[in-house]
Image (cartoon, coloured by chain):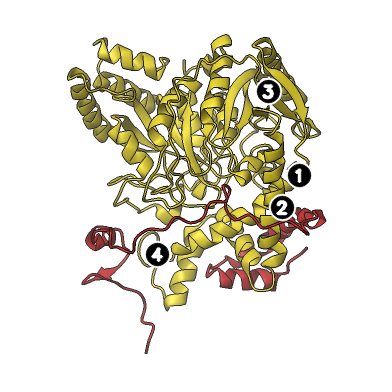
Amino acid sequence: MQSKSIAELGAAMRAGEFSSVELTRHFIDRIEGMNGDLNALITITSDQALAEAEAADRAINSGQAGPLTGIPLVQKDIFCTQGVKTSCGSKMLDNFISPYDATVVERLKQAGAVTLGKANMDEFAMGSSNETSYYGPVRNPWDRKRVPGGSSGGSAAAVAARLAVAATGTDTGGSIRQPAALCGITGLKPTYGRVSRFGMIAFASSLDQAGPMTRSAEDAALMLQVMAGYDAKDSTCADHPVPDYSATLDNPLQGLKIGLPKEYFGDGLDRAVAASIEEAIALYKELGAEVIEISLPNSGLAVPTYYVVAPAECSSNLSRFDGVRFGYRCEDPKDLEDLYKRSRGEGFGAEVKRRILIGTYALSAGYYDAYYLKAQKTRHLISDDFKRAFETVDVIAGPTSPTTAFTLGEKMNDPVTMYLNDIYTIATNLAGLPGISIPVQPVGGLPVGLQIIGNYFDEGKLLNVAHRLQKETDWHLQTAEGFA
Amino acid sequence: MSLDKSDVEKIAHLARMALDESHIDAYVEDLGNILDLVEQLEAADTEAIEPMSHPLHMAQRMRLDEVTEENCREVNQRVAPKIENGLYLVPKVIE
């Protein structure tokens, strides 16, 4: 049951082979048996899930079912869920029961999806290994000594371990694509503004975007269909038509122009990972695509630009956590300033503090021009690189991450080394472009992700390109030992 | 670019965030390393480049100046650390 696609599960439920309640119980059993070791879910909502499954069964029986009706999912704990703890992986929100639903949560509920629980994540989505979570690290289902990637590490591990059919994630600098790559699943970061950010706890508002994390591009198309679209509650949400993503999945790739940026294949890329990427590219050639070497000359500026823009926006966004209206408050504050300082000092973990400090510094009097304004200009250079590239190619392909999953603790003492994990994903966020990571040939028993970047609002093309490869290969169907 | 202990303490004060005294040296080192990374931006020629504040260069959407939200005070205050009669309680500010 846990290996079927969303479409297969829907068809089976409509044919009466099993009910959504049975399917949901099956996943709850798997979570109860396997999650303790992985720590992928940090809140499990079994009772609510079963009630939602009963409602889904009524819809199925009365012929009202949509593609997601009765499908069990997990929500990254960055999405507000009414009446359910929403911690964002932080002690700061350990006591926070959200009074409302995020738009993404609301839309998935309305589509009949069942929520099994909330997925672990790096604290406030700041991290690339899921080790900054207040609730402890997530373990990679492929090797329990290794990280799942981050920040959507719990979502990726849950889908990879078949603890849920699919999950939501968010991506500010690679947080959907990198864990998808390291856990061997499909993860799509849509165009900035494609999916509403309302009720998604903000990290860096000009970069944050929500997307689906699934086993296949076909499943991702069904999920994005529900998640995408205009929302008046998010003033940055794009008022742009949502195409039928499933309808174009099978389009032929004849004549598709794939650009390979030479900067994404240089030093620092693991040789074996490069070979897996090249194997997938060779398959695309067989499918009729034309492969062109391109250059994104300002790629080297992406990580430094990001580590000004993201911390600056984070320091501003996270100023709302002041111990007054919600969240953690320190014991016995002696005055208001003590209340602010200790609530924040005790409520935030080390990585969040580092980023708040960097951001505060970059925005402080006398430094704004040298850091924030400069980074906004280099951001423009990075964005222009892509603009030029898309004048000659349809999509850009390369590795999602320079290596396979690294071991727990390996990079925790060196923030800058950790930041360089996102060297191939960050530029996409700075430019606001969509990107997808799909599994290709594993290396040493560990998954490898191929990243495909598209032009603005070209998610349909990305899903099409990903799906055609998945039709020819079984990399996306491979499951970690013990979780099949 | 390196920061010293007093710089980090000043930034922490601006962020209204208490730092554990025993961790400050580690922050001094980590922030210095991050700023070294960021310094690579200086080499980029941005003389004629406009700053980019929105990925799609979209302008902020305008809306009519109307009340659209319901009063959710009671619901929102259920998650407050300390309230009384609908007010948030904090330590005394004015003597």
Mark nearest the camera among 3 and 2 is 3
Q: CA distance from mark 2 to mark 4?
A: 39 Å
Residue A257 tag number: 3
The residue carrying pointer 2 sits among few (fewer than 14), some (14 to 19) or many (20 or more) residues within 10 Å by Cα, namely many
For the point 64% across and 66% down, which residue is it?
A: A361
Q: Are marks 4 and 1 on the same chain?
A: yes
- The chain holding disc 2 is A
Mark 3 vs 2: CB contact within 8 A: no
- Measured as percent of width and height from the top left, residue A176 is found at 54, 36
Report whether A436 appears left or right of A277: left
Residue beneath disc 2: A378
Chain B: drawing colour: red
Secondary structure, mark 4, is loop
Mark with earlier residue (1, 3): 3
The residue carrying pointer 3 sits among few (fewer than 14), some (14 to 19) or many (20 or more) residues within 10 Å by Cα, namely some
Q: Amino acid at mark 4?
A: Arg
Secondary structure, mark 3, is strand
Looking at the image, residue A33 lies above or below residue A362: above
